[in-house]
Amino acid sequence: MPKHSSRPFLTVVALWFVAACFAGLSGRVAAMTPPLPQVMIGMLTLALVLSGALHAGLRDWLKQVNLRGFVAFHLTRYVGIAFLLMYQSGSLPGEFALTAGWGDIVAATGAMAIVLLLRDPMSKPGVLLLWNTFGLADILLVVITATRIAMHSPADIRALLVFPMSLVPTFVVPLIIASHVLVLMRLRQLAKTIA
């Protein structure tokens, strides 16, 4: 399989990050009311997963790229520390902040261990599967918890829609979920080649 460049993917992600910053700074994200933020997260995540499945060049690149960079992206989950601090200051409810905060910190710490100890995470599929399963379950629980709170009391989690925290739903969460899906696909692909 010919080696594909990471540049197109990284360029799109960089442009998306800039757009997410502008959307947050402009106040457009903060002006959203439920269920719009939840729909946005779902659509962005679906767009990422479908792009990886349907775009031939991206699909080929994702099949052979070293997953270490994707795992390293999960270091952003140390945002869980900010969730805990926001809970202490009263700007986030404990129902969200404690679950999201500690779960994200554990997932980020696992990601750090993988990045520091493995040049290629696929070399230890059992370790990667364990971390990925925990990380995916955690992020889905976080999204479900945030959605439940937002539908009953939008003001309780409004702080997540104000820049810079607005980058969590507009940029970080969709990439985290999509990267977990990618890891699952790669592990499945590996299992097929071994079988």
Image: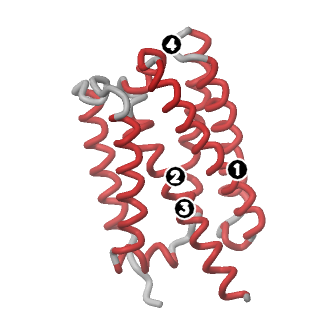
- CA–CA distance in space, label 1 to label 3: 13 Å
| Residue situated furthest front in the rendering | 152
Residue 114 image position (x, y, % from top left): 70, 57
Q: Given contact means CB atoms under 8 Å apart, are the residues at marks 3 and 2 in contact?
A: yes
Q: Sequence-wise, which precedes: disc 4 or disc 3? A: 4
* Residue 65 in the image: above or below residue 77: below
Of helix, strand and loop, which one carries label 1? helix
The image quadrant of residue 25 is top left
Of helix, strand and loop, which one carries label 4? loop
Q: Residue at x 73, y 70 (%)?
A: 125
The image quadrant of residue 107 is top right
Q: Sequence-wise, which precedes: disc 1 or disc 3? A: 1
Amino acid residing under circle 4: Ser
Q: Which label belongs to residue 181?
A: 3
Q: Which residue is mark 4?
A: 91
Amino acid residing under circle 1: Phe
Q: Which label belongs to residue 177?
A: 2
Residue 120 can be seen in this image? yes
- CA–CA distance in space, label 4 to label 2: 25 Å
* Residue 91 in the image: above or below residue 125: above
Q: Which residue is mark 1?
A: 134
Q: Given contact means CB atoms under 8 Å apart, are the residues at marks 2 and 1 in contact?
A: no
Question: In this image, 149 relative to 127: left or right?
Answer: left
* Residue 177 in the image: above or below residue 31: below
Amino acid residing under circle 2: Ile
